Image: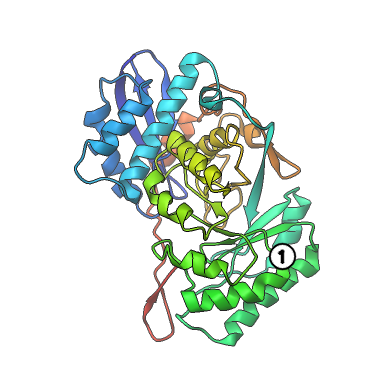
Amino acid sequence: MKITRLELFTVPPRWLFLKVSTDAGIEGWGEPVVEGRAETVAAAVRELEYCLLGQDPRRIEDLWQAMYRGGFYRGGPVLTSAMSGVEQALWDIKGKALGVPVYELLGGPVRESMRVYSWIGGDRPADMARMALERRAQGYTAVKTNATAECAWIDSPKVVDQVCERLQAIRDAVGLDLDVAVDFHGRVHKAMARVLMKELEAFRLFFIEEPVLCEHEDVFAELRQHTGTPIATGERNYTRWGFRGLLAGGGVDVIQPDVSHAGGILECRKIAAMAECYDVAVAPHCPLGPIALAACLQLDFCTPNVLIQEQSLGIHYNQGSDLLDYLVDRSVFAYRDGTVARLTAAGLGITVNEAVVRQAAATGHQWRNPVWRLPDGTVTEW
């Protein structure tokens, strides 16, 4: 079997899909994208074609090594996201060729269902109590929300009080019926992170995500001294080498590799195995499309230390198209009691509606991260 063609589809709301074709008539799908940089990642995929065309798609580890090590410069979000989408498609092909789900090729299933969580509140969190009630009514058992909007290096007590008021509103509405995770989104600097994490202890959070940016790797261990709440991070770390120091530092309880950014399914399985050695849980990052979610679930079903799975159904980014719109069988992600049942179809476990994808790609998208500024005009973290 040989790879004959790679096709890319930029589709709303902010996704990039990849179709890999073979001379055996078996096709695989992947989702190589950096949010806001879809065109850049598409160019990186095209640059990788020289490593892939004419090669046996079943030699996944060998092709990964060629893509990663074949260039003098390696790593980073663009290259590893391009590689991730290719790798997902290769696993899809291999699973289909053998007639089994991908997780069967990575040790077999360790669970029958996977817990998922839903976003509430939007980029600038608001109306969270109402949305928490809605999610509970929809059967979710866990939600995540952003902590703040823009945040200065050291901000006012009013900002801290507003965060607490929003979380108190959630607890008043749903009590402890929902686990609540709070995402600082890298918007908060070290001094404010210490203050907020101390104040948020009272709300018994599921975890606090990205309390500071991942490049401040040494700060996580320091912040661990200021809270008993589990600390999560990792969506902006790439490959096992990008997680090694983070895990060794002892400041995180949950890592969040993204199967579309960190190097693909097998690379994230290796990262999860490293985390297990440090007694750290895994909650894969995935505010993306259905192919990325299917790839995450293949990882989840064969990985014992996965805690919960992020998914994008109804997320505030999904304007015009949503998670299920590109699937032939929308019931494959039917959530029940806040979980999704183990996928059983071969490959990634989904069938992409190619006609819908091609139609949507004719429209495409130009999604970009917003650029936020503080009142004095300085650029701040989104």
Is 360 situated above or below 248? Answer: above
Which percent across, then down, holds residue 283?
Answer: 57, 48
Residue 127 seen by the camera: yes
At a point 55% along the width and 75% down the height, the residue shown is 194
Residue 363 seen by the camera: no
Q: Nearer the viewer, residue 83 or 212?
A: 212
Amino acid type, residue under disc 1 in the picture: Arg
Is 379 situated above or below 312? Answer: below
Is 374 situated above or below 169? Answer: below
Give the quarter of the figure containing the N terminus. Answer: top left
Relative placement, left or right, of 158 versus 358 is right
Q: Quadrant of residue 58?
A: top left
Total tally of numbered discs in the picture: 1
Which percent across, then down, holds residue 294?
Answer: 54, 35
Give the quarter of the figure containing the C terminus. Answer: bottom left
Which residue is the site of mark 1?
204
Which percent across, then down, holds residue 129?
Answer: 73, 66
